[in-house]
Every structure is written in C-alpha cells, then in structure tokens.
Amino acid sequence: MKYVLICFTLMTWSASIQAQTAEDSVKAVINQLFQGMKLADSSLLKASFADHAILQTVETAADGTISIRDESIHSFIESIAKLPRDAADERIRFDMVKTDGALATAWTPYQFYFKGKFSHCGVDSYQLVRLQGGWKIQYLIDTRRKDGCL
C-alpha cells in the first residue's frame, strides 16, 4: 500500500512539473517577443512567430463601430526593427496561460510606452503551437485604448 501511495505521489508531482514547464515555455516565447520589441531586434521578433502567423488588432472607431485590422508579421517586424532601442516598450502581465499538448493560449493585459511616454493599454490574446523548434505564436490579436488603463 505504501508503495502505491509513493508511486501515485511521484506521478502527480511529475505531471505537475511537466505542466509548469510547458506554461513557463509559453511565457518565455511571449517575453521574447517583447524583449525583441524593446531591443528592436528583428531576429528575436521573427523567432517568436510561426511561419504563417496572423497578427490583428480590434479597433473601435469614434462612432463605436468595431473592426479588425490585419498586419503582416513581416511589416510588424520591419517597423519595429527601424525604431531606436527602447522605443517600443510593452509591459505585460500574465493573467492566464493554458496548454493542451501542442496548443497553448495566453491572455496578457498590457501598457505600451513609446519612447518613454505612455501611449495606450489593452489586452493581447495569443494562440501558440509547439512545433519542432519549440513554442511559436500562431495568432495574436489585441485591443487598444487610452482610457481605463491601470
């Protein structure tokens, strides 16, 4: 009986460690994205995304109309790489990270500073896939606003 209890404890502990490792790996890729932005490092940015990743923003017009704006990953990386170091500083907080095998999702409220000045805040929502090279962002959609920022 004692042997069964020890085996069960070790299996539960092992599963907990593996789940924690996957979550930490997902967080590391997302943090790499923002480190790449802060450093204006195109190689870090490119390494964060899957080959055919999708980047979108939810926009609200002055009249309240909601639309979705698409941006190519290539254009995003190119625009950030042209900035001076430390110009793009997005500060995130991980509210939620979930994984299931090779699929992960994350939700991160953020505040964005441009050249040291507050610009806007919102939420980033990610879908990541674990490929041969590790976790990659496949889909990123965000909201942006100037009011209600913490």
Image (cartoon, helix red, strand yellow):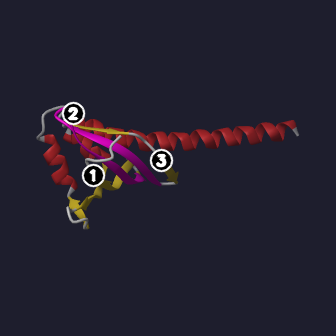
Q: Are marks 1 and 2 in contact (CB under 8 Å)?
A: no
- Name which of mark 1 and mark 3 comes first in the sequence: 3
What's under tag 2, amino acid-wise?
A: Leu
Q: Is residue 6 above or below residue 69?
A: above
Q: Between tags 1 and 3, which lies in front?
A: 1
Q: Where residue 99 appears, x then y in whole percent?
A: 50, 51
Q: Residue at x 43, y 50 (%)?
A: 106
Q: Secondary structure at mark 1?
A: loop
What's under tag 1, amino acid-wise?
A: Arg
Q: Report the front residue among 132 and 88.
A: 88
- Name which of mark 2 and mark 3 comes first in the sequence: 2
What's under tag 3, amino acid-wise?
A: Met
Query: Would you name the residue on which mark 3 appears?
Result: 96
Q: Where residue 131 appears, x then y in whole percent?
A: 40, 52
Q: Residues within 10 Å of mark 2 (few under 14, many from 20)?
A: many
Q: Residues within 10 Å of mark 1 (few under 14, many from 20)?
A: some
Query: Would you name the residue on which mark 1 appears?
Result: 144
Q: Report the front residue among 25 and 88.
A: 88
Q: Report the front residue among 89 and 118.
A: 118
Q: CA distance from mark 1 to mark 3?
A: 19 Å
Q: Where residue 58 appears, x then y in whole percent?
A: 28, 60
Q: CA distance from mark 2 to mark 3?
A: 25 Å
Tally the marks: 3
